[in-house]
Image (cartoon, helix red, strand yellow):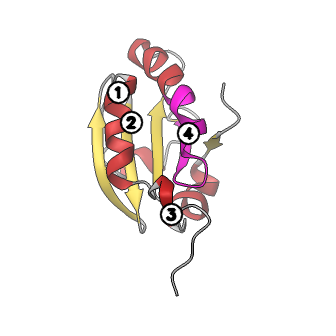
Amino acid sequence: MSESVLHITDTDFKQTVLEANLPVLVDFWAPWCGPCKQVGPVVDAVAPDYVGRAIICKMNVDDSPETPPAYSIRGIPTLMIFKDGEVAKTHVGAVTEKELRVMLEQYSKPAEDEGLSES
């Protein structure tokens, strides 16, 4: 597991995801889900590259029964990118590292902006 990935629940979803000032990727998963076991390491692998550019989270749907239905999640794994508190992108099913990076690049803060402020 990557230290760059937050594990969230229904309790901290609003603060961590909806009120975030960066785009947020949420991996909705469950330990019994085969495809989730394929996606988990992919999410862990890319997370360190997005520190400061996006927030990467995982939510176990078995431990958090309120949030997934609120976003019409019927199949897992489901990856959602939230931007400004709204769903910007949804992908259901397994994803390769390359596909996940393409998704994140569309919504994450550009790497070259790190440490710069607008005047």
As displayed, is residue 16 above or below residue 119? above
Give the residue displayed 65% in from the left and 39% down from the top: 4
Q: CA distance from mark 1 to mark 4?
A: 13 Å
Q: Earlier in the sequence, mark 3 or mark 4?
A: 4
Question: Type of residue at label 3?
Answer: Asp
Q: Earlier in the sequence, mark 4 or mark 2?
A: 4
Label 3: which residue?
Answer: 113
Q: x, y (%) of residue 58?
A: 55, 38
Quarter the N terminus occupies: top right
Q: Tag 2, which secondary structure?
A: helix
As displayed, is residue 82 above or below residue 38? below
Q: Are marks 4 and 2 in contact (CB under 8 Å)?
A: yes
Q: CA distance from mark 4 to mark 2?
A: 10 Å
In the image, the segment drawn in magenta is 43-59
Q: Are marks 3 and 4 in contact (CB under 8 Å)?
A: no
Does the stretch in magenta take in 47? yes
Q: Are marks 1 and 4 in contact (CB under 8 Å)?
A: no
Point out the frontmost of discs 3 and 4: 3
Q: Tag 3, which secondary structure?
A: helix
Give the residue displayed 45% in from the left and 36% down from the top: 28
Label 1: which residue?
Answer: 98
Residue density around tag 4, few if under 14, some if 14–19, many if 20 or more, within 10 Å: few
Q: CA distance from mark 3 to mark 4?
A: 14 Å
Q: Is residue 115 left or right of residue 18?
A: right
Residue 101, disc: 2
Residue density around tag 1, few if under 14, some if 14–19, many if 20 or more, within 10 Å: few
Question: Type of residue at label 2?
Answer: Arg
Q: CA distance from mark 2 to mark 3?
A: 18 Å
